[in-house]
Amino acid sequence: MMDGPRSDVGRWGGNAWQPPTTPSPEPEPEPDRRSRRGGRSFWARCCGCCSCRNETDADWGPEPHGDRGSGSRGRGSSSGGRRPDSRGSDSRRPGSRASGGVNAAGDGTIREGMLVVTGVDLLSSRSDRNRREHHTDEFEYDELILRRGQPFEMVLHLSRPYESSDHVALELLIGNNPEVGKGTHVIIPVGKGGSGGWKAQVTKASGQNLNLRVHTSPNAIIGKFQFTVRTRSEAGEFQLPFDPHNEIYILFNPWCPEDIVYVEHEDWRQEYVLNESGRIYYGTEAQIGERTWNYGQFDHGVLDACLYILDRRGMPYGGRGDPVSVSRVISAMVNSLDDNGVLIGNWSGDYSRGTNPSAWVGSVEILLSYLRTGYSVPYGQCWVFAGVTTTVLRCLGLATRTVTNFNSAHDTDTSLTMDIYFDENMKPLEHLNHDSVWNFHVWNDCWMKRPDLPSGFGGWQVVDATPQETSSGIFCCGPCSVESIKNGLVYMKYDTPFIFAEVNSDKVYWQRQDDGSFKIVYVEEKAIGTLIITKAIGSNMRDDVTHIYKHPEGSEAERKAVETAASHGSKPNVYSTRDSAEDVAMQVEAQDAVMGQDLTVCVVLTNRGGSRRTVKLHLYLSVTFYTGVTGSVFKESKKEVVLAPGASERVSMPVAYKEYRPHLVDQGSMLLNVSGHVKENGQVLAKQHTFRLRTPDLSLTLLGAAVVGQECEVQIVFKNPLPVTLTNVVFRLEGSGLQRPKILNVGDIGGNETVTLHQKFVPVRPGPRQLIASLDSPQLSQVHGVIQVDVAPAPGGGGFFSDAGGDSHSGETIPMASRGGA
């Protein structure tokens, strides 16, 4: 996916994350950044009216220093405590005592008449107005979580009543070396009108309380900020010590029209930002499978994990206000290649050293494990990468959805076509066939304006965290404007050529000629990107979004887009060599195949011409991974068919379970290769058809009512569809607001045996919730189930959260006595 010299900030080799050293209990003060003899004081820099103070007021003492925090590894770690190698943003620093403050002399002496801030109420609880108005009340955090570009309220508790002659300024700091010019050190003089959208106003001064309304910039950096207050009065100057309880998270804001991630429609925001679960689709276009995924973006610890991902790569804080840069970094960091990111990809079928990608039911366990250990989590495939990416981007405030593309091409030579090579007898030349077509591929759309592109290319942007090809030497992909994909504008950044080929390239069949050259004998124009879907807004129905990615198949606009894109590829004249007659049509049919049962595949030939046609037909059946990588052919059939003008004939090939069982690979898909030759006119017929073997679902039943803070029980029932024993069976169970990720080791399940499990959990948040389960074993995977749980509020109102609902990194062995019979 090379697209010219790298100009993005998706990687910073010079700022790679290094395990921080353990800070000393009392770090040495850094030199004062202002010269006592000629430097300008804090107030002179933030407030023009204060630049002519008396010389005795010229120094505020040392500025806060030391580690101001990474913005992610502070309180709220999923491990229940600070990571051993973490430097939280609540590190102690000179002058930051548990009580008291810093005066002009820096000795902590409080003089009579000084305006001392004795406390701060950020109104940060989930039930307070700030969290509700900023749509962050579902986060299982006690800290204040804001969306940028939107005002919030706070109350300062003072040592005496506030007077008009008093000067108050708020400060927000992020990163190791905060600088005003980079937006990492924000100074907000109260009542003076700030810059860049930052300002603070007094709304009420009552007794020793000062109520403020603070406006944040719609371009603010996202992350976790430290907060302090400075005051100046005739009696002296005071700085409030840094307190980890006063840390403030700031996120992107799709509710703010001035934010470039703004989304106009409320139902879109509810679905693509606030919905904690969703559907991910897989399988084939004719046999679509679906599974529920727990995004869990508001679960305790997940926000810290998302910010830790940015820290781990060493992304400059000054670039974290740009959603283009942030989403590009996330697309790279969710996979482990290059940078020890979140997930290790594995398509080998051997998952003995980790978790089968089909066994995951959500993102929470993955992200918390990465935050807790710092090590990449094994293993992921495309839907896992996409599910985690949806969690991270929604958590940070970007409207994001998980998208599935059926018959997704993997173009390895930048030709923007899928090229399949055959010899003179139409036998595949495997050593030349490097391009592949995945049964399905899952990626993400996120919504933003694109100020780095010409007008008209904002809106949905593709971000793909699955490591397939490198982009500027790094395994990342996007953000890429969907509008540029639709029109074949492959010169638009980022990675448009690769994504265009995934959804709208043609499958081109090349035959070797007697002189060694190759000639196009067949072009399959509707074979790639046949269906692109996502979960519908407000329901669990499918939403077909193919039309936003491509013009109608076969239309003049669609053909123009394909040929425009191909003209920028490595084979710009590919369509000029096209030459074939086509009067015999071929269609492949496959019944709904079930794992463990016999099946039948059929090929239908139709003569659309006015003369008799004789077709020599070859059928080859093999097992395949969903990525298009196939096993050896285990069954084949050859037949000659004579077709009268206008006639059709069906050719069937039955396949018994005992025939395909020894050859099954991960996810149990089949690939039928069909080729034919029309004797009379030399027409070549070619078709590749994939179909999956459907697996059973888990049946979940809630036993009793669900109430916040009260224990309830779920029953899980599974019947083994195979006549063989499933060994080392593992169940997974999780649901945001219901159950922290939990692993259940069941052991073996006999052939055609039914098992029944009972699990108890304690809901922590009210409202409609999704409880999701999966089953995995070496013999059977891709088994899952879901139930909606409507949780009533606690009798006293409100909710609570704790880690009592399960442990994300331990397994529980289920005794045989708790299992049902066959």
Image (cartoon, grey):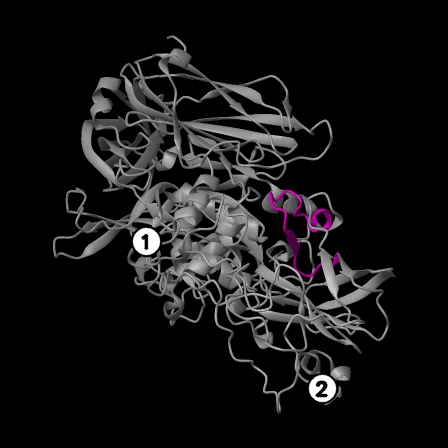
Label 1 residue SS: loop
- Observer able to see residue 167: yes
Is residue 105 toward the left or the right of residue 558 in the image?
Answer: right
Question: How far across and down, in percent of the image, does residue 261 sit?
Answer: 61, 58
Query: Between 537 and 285, which is closer to the camera in this rendering?
Result: 537
Q: Which amino acid does label 2 sit on?
A: Thr
In the rendered image, the vertical position of residue 780 relative to residue 624, given as above or below? above
Q: Main secondary structure of the magenta part?
A: loop
The furthest residue to the bottom? 38
**Magenta-colored span:** 131-153
Q: Residue 221 occupies which quadrant of the picture?
A: bottom right
Q: What residue type is labelled 1?
A: Asp
Q: Which residue is drawn at 46% across and 64% down?
A: 315
Q: Which of marks 1 and 2 is in front?
A: 2
* Residue 422 x, y percent position in the rendering: 19, 46
Task: Please tell me which residue lies in front, 137 or 458.
Answer: 137
Q: Does the magenta stretch include residue 136?
A: yes
Q: Which mark is residue 411?
A: 1
Q: In which quarter of the image is residue 247?
A: bottom right
**Residue 587: x %, y % from top left:** 35, 32
Q: Name the residue under label 2.
A: 56
Tell which residue pokes out farthest to the top in this image.
Answer: 821
- State which quarter of the image contains the C terminus: top left
How many residues crowd around disc 2 within 10 Å: few (fewer than 14), some, or many (20 or more)? few
Residue 155 versus residue 300 in the image, above or below = below
Q: What residue is rendered at 21% in x and 35% in y?
A: 631
